[in-house]
Amino acid sequence: MTIAVSHVEYQTEKRHYAHIDCPGHADFVKNMITGAAQMDGAILVVSAADGPMPQTREHILLARQVGVPALVVFLNKVDLVDDPELLDLVEMEIRELLTKYGFPGDDIPIVRGASKPAYDSPADPEANKCIADLLDAVDSYIPEPERELDKPFLMAIEDVFSIEGRGTVATGRIERGVVNVGDEVEIVGLKEKADKTTVTGVEMFKKVLDSGQAGDNVGCLLRGINREAIERGQVLAKPGTIKPHMKFECEVYVL
């Protein structure tokens, strides 16, 4: 069971994906918001044996609220359902739910399959066909995102940790622009004055990079910054390009 948001990467014939695994359990729906806010598209996993759960509705609504542009549905555990008509009913319920919350329910691909046999038998083509079908649906249905590479660097900080002997690392998804090793950046937010620092390293999925760009989930190693001086809720930005505000208009959804 997923509790916190986690990140993995994989490759299809058409694309390279940074996949954010979000919690599905009702007790951890709030943690899903962190991942959903970073998504260019989403795979909604629904159990064929249970049908849409209350948290499924929460996930669809939150995806709409944070602006996830497109969804693909994976109807999981179909091996536990013997009645084809029951599968059709579950699929119909999912489509109605998607439509209710503003997604094109009639058009969204719903791929039927069973993840456990695929996980247990990775070399079995038949067991893994549903996974291949799912990735094909994601490749074809989720639009290619437009990256704002020409704008000033901005990254919302998702997490912070220390590496002994090296310094403090801030992780997150780059919203816009490019950051290079050696670039000066500002830590903005939650305090009156921004702190300046230099990016001394960039990593993505345990690979050392010379730079990161819009859409990448990276960790930035920051020079001379203590772990206590930076936190989630702040942003890294090109110096002088962003100003924090004390008042703003927003929509609030109370869980």
Image (tube, rainbow, N blue to C red):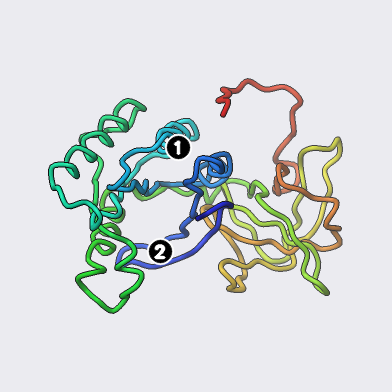
Residue name at image x 58 percent, y 44 percent: 31
Q: Please name the amino acid that badge 2 sits on.
A: His
In the rendered image, the vertical position of residue 165 relative to residue 191, given as above or below: below
Question: In this rendering, would 240 be left or right of 101?
Answer: right
Q: Please name the amino acid that badge 1 sits on.
A: Gln
Question: Which of the two residues, 169 or 63, is positioned nearer the viewer here?
Answer: 63
- Which quarter of the figure is the C terminus placed in? top right
In the rendered image, the vertical position of residue 11 relative to residue 66, given as above or below: below
Residue 167 drawn at (x, y percent): 81, 67
- Residue at the disc numbered 2: 16
Residue name at image x 63 percent, y 20 percent: 249
Question: Which of the two residues, 137 or 146, is positioned nearer the viewer here?
Answer: 137
Circles 2 and 1, Cβ within 8 Å, touching? The answer is: no
Marks 2/1: CA–CA distance = 29 Å
Can you tell which mark lies on residue 242?
none
Residue 22 drawn at (x, y percent): 50, 50
Q: What count of labels does the image hold?
A: 2
Looking at the image, tell me whether mark 2 or mark 1 is earlier in sequence order: 2
Question: Which of the two residues, 37 or 54, is positioned nearer the viewer here?
Answer: 54
User: Which class describes the residues within 10 Å of circle 1: few (<14), some (14-19), or many (20+)?
Assistant: some
Please identify the quarter of the rendering in which residue 199 is found.
bottom right
- Residue at the disc numbered 1: 55
In the rendered image, the vertical position of residue 205 relative to residue 233, given as above or below: below
Residue 188 drawn at (x, y percent): 76, 42
For marks 2 and 1, give the one nearer the viewer.
1
